[in-house]
Amino acid sequence: MFKVRYVIKKIGFLFITLFSVLTFNFFLFRILPGDPLRLIARAGNLSSDSIARLNELFGLNQPKWMQYLIYLKNLATGQFGTSITFRRPVIEILQERLLNTAILLTLATIIVVAIGVGAGAIAATRRGSRLDNVFVVTSMVCWSLPTFWAGLILIILLGVSLSFFPIAGISTPGMIYFSSWDRIMDFARHLVLPTITLIIVDMAQFFMITRSALVDVLTTDYIHTAKAKGLSKNRILWKHAFPNALLPIVTATAVYVSLLIGGAIQVETVFSFPGMGKLMYDAVLRRDYPILEASFFIFAVFTILANFISDVIYMIIDPRVKNV
Amino acid sequence: MNEKNINEKNNTSTSLILGRFKNETWVQQMWADPLGKAGIIILVAVILISIIGPIVFPFDSKAGDSVEGVFRPPSSVHWLGTDDMGRDIFRATLTGAQVSLFVGLTASAISIIVGAIVGLLSGYYFGFGSNLSMRVTDFFFVLPVLPLIIVLASIFGQNIYITILVIGLTSWPSTARIVRSQVLSIREYKFIERIKSLGATDFRIIFAHILPNVMPLIYSNTVLVIAGAILAEATLAFLGLGDPVRVSWGTMLHYAFVSGAAGRQAWWYLLPPGIGIVLVVLSFTLTGHTLDKILNPRLRDY
Amino acid sequence: MFSNSKLLFDKLLVLCLIFTIVICGCSQGAQSQTIDKETLRIGWTSEPDTLNPLTTISTEALQVLGLVYEPLLAYGTNLETIYKLAESYTYSDDGLVVTYKLRSGVKWHDGEPFTSEDVVSTYNLIKDTGIGQYYQYMEFLEDVSGPDDLTVVMTFSEPQAFNMAQAVLILPKHIWGEMTAEEIEMFSNDAPIGTGAFTFSEWRQGSTVTLKRFDDYYGEPAGPGQIIFVLYGNEDVMAQALKGNEIDIITEVSPLVWEGLQNTENIKAVSLPSFSFHHIGINVCGDETSLGNPFLKDKAVRQALSYALDREQLVNIALAGHGSPGASIIPAGMMEWQYIPDEQMDADLDKANELLDEAGYMDTNEDGIREKNGVPLVFRIMAIESTTVDVRAVQLFRDSAKKAGIKLELSTVDENTLAGVVYNVDAPDWDLFVWGWDSDYPDPGYLLGVPLTSQIGNNNDVFYSNPEYDALYSQQSTEVDRAKRKIVTDEMQKIFYEDAPYLVMWYQDKLQAYRTDTWTGWEETPGGIIYNVTYENYKNVQPIQ
């Protein structure tokens, strides 16, 4: 019963956190120096009428608290505002970008988890062996790679010298698609390098967490007792070790999401991948407040949700949690 | 873990700090482990190089004078070739080591101190203050790191001190959280009650008794934080948000990227800074991994 | 050891195998790609902001819009005036009335017929709402009318040196005619309908813009059946794409990347004179509220800075030699309009030191920096982080200025922050900056109009105010006789040069490259093969079979 109360409490905190992020978001972007309209005026020779009108349209000359209320009202109605650079609703700009990034990150995560957990289990069960050492060292080297640098090296190795895979964008310009399959394969080919980059760097995180969590469990008296009792090794691993190791792994997921988002921004920049990461970075350069808020908010929401879900799962799995 | 184990661990680690367990043995243990040994060697080497290197081979940040001097491959004059302004990359890499390490270490120091204090205080005390600080910690914890760093750096400017502050202020929550959760369990232990009943002040309890038990965690966390800080600085600089006046490994890679080093196949420009970053971060990771093993006795059991 | 983990190991191996097969399968796909030979693929590193010709400020957008829409007159591949929607025009004797005879049988992309009403509607729309970059040319426009379907009459109060009919894109009345100013500001124009040789097909944000050949075009059918503009996040990657035959031509790249394209098989790298310059702007705001360093209001200091600057060195290092040292604000690409000063205030440290000595700035405390009344000559200078050539330039400038006893404190910011700081009319808090100007058209009027007093708060980024200069500007803008106009523009350039609120560093070359094995017929126009005021190259090239 207390678990239900716990969950409700967590949901409550979830909303409070979301609201705080909204507010934090708003103020953060309003204290940025730099006025986007000035740049537009310079390049476009706007009449002062035009400038006045634009200021009004974007509510830029109203007192902050007024802007804040407008902001909240818009969010409640599902509007993320209008982009200053593109002059169209932010939602429209976000849609396709979100999809691209989602595909990239989902693909990467599936493979990362599969490899990370799998290799982690192998390494843990064979800890101390040469294989384990190789895995550990390899994964540490991978973890130490800056994601963007890994991408650059891949570009040179596989994209320029060997030309196996495209190094930019999501489609081949001018290609004629004879079927949907062609189109999908083209997209897939463009996904390869960015995904591999993400995998190389992020898999290490998962591997290390899994391995150390498993090792932690596998060296307890509890497991030694089980071994002594003659239980099959497989059974010990899957029925006894893993469930206990899940806790730290699940907790790590939340941190992993933040890492993943950071990775996405770098990878999208290096590979000209039209996703949320690149959008956000371009928006910072142009001081496009509405896009910035929206993308920062979305990233934050994902991270918060990931934390929330991992908290709930943690609670479900861990019988010891009573109150927080 | 049952209480018996904890007390054992408690005693071992307390004594670690209180010095009964000699420091040399601790380092010796690190040395005995091949990974730990590698980590220490690399770390010491990098630190030495970053201190001595720029003195022996000072870097001249003035641009070269001729067009022919740019993007030259390694030669006897320029051991690692020249960059897009005709400057010596070998020397730039040495100077870059200093900057990258400086930012990484300073930012981490801020992060860990703030994180540890927040963690200790919010873990030990009950009530509004503790809840509030926990909420604030959680709030900053769930903000995605790189987007936040990018935004803060672009608001407050691009100089090295801003970078340090920004990185420091975005990474303290992880330390705080870890410390806090450990403190939560420690404060329940009988021996704390005993000390309290003997009349010790909160301050003493926290810093003289709880802190030592948390130190091992802080140590292993520190190492990760430093690694993360160095990577963060490199990423920020690569994205163009670093201090343009100073040469750091990240800014070198930034200029390499935008000036077309990849296309010119100027591997001598792209490899050294990247390898530098990897080595430094790796040394901390290796050290951290070994430290984990040492401080958690059970992990030594293979 | 756990022997059953062997099963795990095997499973992992299988996974890896599957993964590898998928990857190989993907790369097999590479060989069987079919690329449409009639699609012209163009690479750029920035994409349009909007497809609305009245609200756009992006060069990329104009490239697309200039193919979908057309003006009455346009520029050919030698920058000569050519006829588009107008087939002829005549001036009245006093030069105040222009009559255009329009082409007949022209259709909009949606099938509607084109008439003079569209022209009248477009001009009136801009004049009435004041929206967009064309408005600046309409100061003296009195009336636009269409006496019949194929005739347009424009009446001015002053003769016009620059004929804006070469600029203003004609919009369909049946779409734009009734729009209010607010509607125009917010109109994204997602499906532009024009009269040009290409119709708009789609814009995949962050990725590509596609245009298709218009089969009912009144003129010669265009060579490309389709044009795709491809967005790359980085110039180097774009250059790789060109080498890899992923694109046919690129819009523009920086010097070092361009160098990498030299001597590459099947690629021609060209260097063309451009209509732009990069400069150092000096805060000469005369208001007391200005927070700029007051020493900069002393002409001697500005001229000394100019003498300290070694422009040849800047061109060699920052631009890798691809440009020429600058002086006047009219770039070399504009040929006869450019004023070349007899005495160049350039690369003469002795003269710089001499000027400062005479003006009383001495280094009394031997710290290498001159002072006056105890205040040292220390100036803040800002550059845009992402414009690498500017950052390099300012680093070099800092070293040079030091030798004249002036200290420069460098900071780099993003473009928007710089704009916010520089254009702050209330209290401009800056000393120097590095930036650049691009002239939209090969007419000096635009660039000369930048430092006008009336442009303070708009284009006039240095707060320069000189009534004599303003008067001369009005004079030249209404002087139709080229020779007479040149005398006035020369005078203006001389005044501005000697006052030195701008230190023009260089006129950079337009560096472009294209493949020689996919399309033929590229003409190397001053200002650029593409990404220029002429759109003819897009239409004239033919695919190589």
Image: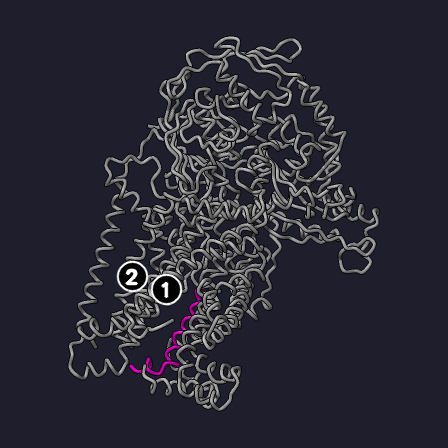
Marking on residue A9: 1
In percent of width and height, residue B253 lies at: 49, 55
Res B255 seen here: no
Judging from the image, mark 2 belongs to the subunit labelled A
Q: Residue at x 21, y 55 (%)?
A: C18
In percent of width and height, residue C204 lies at: 38, 37
- Tell me the crowding category of disc 2: few under 14, some 14 to 19, or many 20 or more residues within 10 angstroms, Cα based: many
Q: Quadrant of residue C440?
A: top right
Q: Secondary structure at mark 1?
A: helix
Judging from the image, mark 1 belongs to the subunit labelled A
The boundaries of the magenta stretch are: B278-302
Q: Quadrant of residue C219?
A: top left
Marking on residue A113: 2
Q: Residue at x 46, y 36 (%)?
A: C48
Q: Amino acid at mark 1?
A: Lys
Q: Are marks 2 and 1 on the same chain?
A: yes
Q: State yes or no: residue A224 in magenta.
A: no
Q: State yes or no: residue B295 in magenta.
A: yes
Label 2 – label 1 distance at C-alpha: 30 Å
- Tell me the crowding category of disc 1: few under 14, some 14 to 19, or many 20 or more residues within 10 angstroms, Cα based: few
Q: Nearer the viewer, residue B294 or A156?
A: B294
Q: Residue at x 83, y 54 (%)?
A: C373
Quarter in which the C terminus of chain C is drawn = top left
Q: Say how the picture is coloured.
A: one colour
Q: Amino acid at mark 2?
A: Val
| Vertical position of residue C286 compared to residue B299: above or below | above
Q: Secondary structure at mark 2?
A: helix
Q: Residue at x 41, y 22 (%)?
A: C197
| Vertical position of residue C258 compared to residue C39: above or below | below
Quarter in which the N terminus of chain C is drawn = bottom left
Dot 2 or dot 1: first in sequence order is: 1
**CB atoms of marks 2 and 1 within 8 Å:** no
